[in-house]
Amino acid sequence: MTKLSVNINKVATLRNARGGNVPDVLKVAQDCEEFGADGITVHPRPDERHIRRSDVYALRPLLRTEFNIEGYPSDDFIDLVLKVKPHQVTLVPDSPTQLTSNAGWDTKANLSFLSEVLDGFNQAGIRTSVFVSTDPEMIEYAAKAGADRVELYTEPYASSYAKGREAAVAPFVEAGKVARSLGLGLNAGHDLNLENLHYFYQNIPWLDEVSIGHALICDALYLGLQRTIQEYKNCLR
Ligand code: PXP
């Protein structure tokens, strides 16, 4: 079964726009779970422009499904994750001011840094995932660094889907095979949506998890959160 982890950063962005507590990020996370999400993802950034550190602490005891915290492993981030102890941490190579993640790690150049960080999380019993492109070498070095999983950066798939989905998915299928041959679990995320998700899943059915935020929250404006989550879950069957 491929799990659907809902990234709720956009909900926090909406809340922060007015300074109050509407929409209530904690309630939305719990509702996502009730409506069928298999996990919740948050990406706390240093400027707290969407998810805040306090949200991360508050979510931990409330969630009944898998909690995934993603972000750049700064000292603050590492400290937060070790205190909160989510089920999974996903390491992303983005700078503090970046709008959204737009590339995977160079796991070869960052091998010693990643090895050290991953070792700390492994020792704390937190499953680790490293955000990478489909380059087989990047996946091999993620395994060398000690990751449990890789998360494939799917923006290139999403942006070329309309031009030809077979060609768009091909490098991801190959990357998925490399990960599997190395004993790594496989996650995917970025710009996945109701149009492109099912085909991705059909071609890589051994995918462990997709993490989806932007499109899902946008769809919820039209379809409602409950129906949206059910439709994304239907794409993973
Ligand atoms: N995976 C990672 C590592 C991300 O940084 C993001 C965006 O925060 C996502 C998945 C979700 O991407 P999207 O919001 O486009 O669904």
Image (cartoon, rainbow, N blue to C red):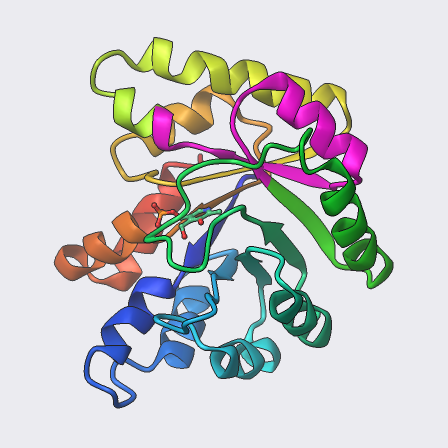
Task: Specify the farthest residue to the right.
Answer: 123
- Horizontal and vertical percent for residue 190? 39, 41
Please state if 120 lies on the left or on the right of 92 as rendered: right
How many marks are shown on the rendered structure? Answer: 0
226 or 188: nearer the eye? 188
Please state if 33 lies on the left or on the right of 76 as rendered: left
Q: Quadrant of residue 35?
A: bottom left
- Horizontal and vertical percent for residue 197? 36, 33
Residue 138: in magenta span = yes
Task: Specify the farthest residue to the bottom.
Answer: 20
66 or 170: nearer the eye? 170
Q: What stretch is highlighted in magenta?
A: 131-156
Q: Residue at x 45, y 28 (%)?
A: 201
Q: Residue at x 53, y 78 (%)?
A: 59
Q: Is residue 135 above or below residue 110?
A: above
Q: In which quarter of the image is residue 52?
A: bottom left
Q: Which residue is drawn at 27% across and 20% down?
A: 160
